[in-house]
Image (cartoon, rainbow, N blue to C red):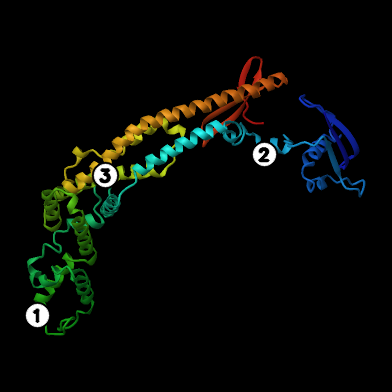
Amino acid sequence: MYRIKIENCNNIVEGELTIEDGKLNIFYGINGTGKTTIAKAIEFSKESQKIEELQSFYTETPASVSISPEVGKILVFNEEFVRDIVFKEDEVIQNSFEVFLKTPNYSQKKAQLDQHLQALHNIMKQDEEIQELQKLLDQIAGKFKRNANGKLNKTGVYKSVLSKSNLYNIPEELDSYRPFITNTEINIPWIDWKSKGDAFDVGDGCPYCSETLNRSVHNQRKEVFKKTYKKSDSQNLKDLLDLLESLRIYVKPEKYDELVSYVKTDVPEDIISAILEKLLLELDVMLKRFAAIVEFGNRRIVLADISKLEQQINEMEIPKSFFEIFGGEKIENVINRINDQVLELRSEAAVLKREMGALKGVMQATIQASQTDINEFLKTAGINYELVILAEDETNSRTILKQCFSGERTDVTKI
């Protein structure tokens, strides 16, 4: 039995009470009689600085509380706890996973599972070649805009590719400019310089060298050049061909030659669009697989993922037979490395699913035990409510309240 003495706490000048060990001790009384003050005084008995909050207005004598024999630990289920934690709309207890489910048994099994998952994540880490390939594919895909139906939009790089004349298909009238246009070191800035110089084309002198011009021939060249060459189009073509050159080791030789020839020469639009759309389709498939691998390696799998695990692994496998443009030893080595890892991950996933199933079993057993203990207490106390714990994992758990009147259980939507 514990004897409690309270002095000068709010409206209590002096009072004594006893609490019997091993029994439910109930204090009842009308509002204002000091029930909350007694609870706070007991709670603050372990924190001397807080007892000052209960100082009475009746006297200068400090508030005090003593408990005999001394109590080791005091927990208070008070009004503040009910307001802040319990009865939040239709959710009875916030963070119910921490309250009910995070048992030592669960924590131990989850730690083992996380360790196993980390090993799986390490399998899927990308090597430097794959990282560089992914970056290159992203750059090429980013050069083209596509409509909602996947067709190429005639803007930007694709518009430049469709140009009937370009850096590699020089009109006959401009043949004298060939040394400048075909020089990959200077052609883009030279085209820019040549275009800007036309603003100073006045009189009979050349705007670049001031020599006397054959105005008829000069004007004809000037008009053809203006229609044929723009710095942006020339830059687009050069950038695209530089990227394709970097991709060359991953593409079938005959397909690479075909692709480059279509970019450089004047071919029907349906031909060039067909091969570019096929290239982009293969790029998309490859990039989606890379993205799935990265996403899997960066995320933390929880119990709710167990049913999706096989689908996620399937989305990482690269279908080698799908590719018509990509091919050769380099790309096959990349695909084989990834698919070998995916195959290993599949076998590991079977173990992972068993471990997750065991962990879920621990959680469900804990839920059942917690619900039974709480609801039996509520029933014994004559309280016509039940708690229902709904939990998938740490990130997805709720505890709701059900009314139990006339043999029916109904949701409590707002307290």
Which label is found at residue 286? Answer: 3
Q: Secondary structure at mark 3?
A: helix
Q: Earlier along the polypeptide chain: callout 1 or callout 3?
A: 1
Q: Earlier along the polypeptide chain: callout 1 or callout 2?
A: 2
Residue type at the position of mark 1: Asn
The mark closer to the camera, 1 or 3, is 3
Residue highlighted by disc 1: 214
Indicate the position of residue 6 as horizontal and vertical percent values: 87, 39
Q: CA distance from mark 3 to mark 2?
A: 50 Å
Indicate the position of residue 147 as horizontal and vertical percent values: 28, 47
Q: CA distance from mark 1 to mark 3?
A: 56 Å
**Identity of the residue drawn at 31% across and 37% down:** 315
Q: Residues within 10 Å of mark 3 (few under 14, many from 20)?
A: many
Residue type at the position of mark 2: Asp
Dividing the image into 4 quarters, which one contains the N terminus? top right
In-image side of 356 versus 401 (left or right): left
**Identity of the residue drawn at 15% across and 50% down:** 272
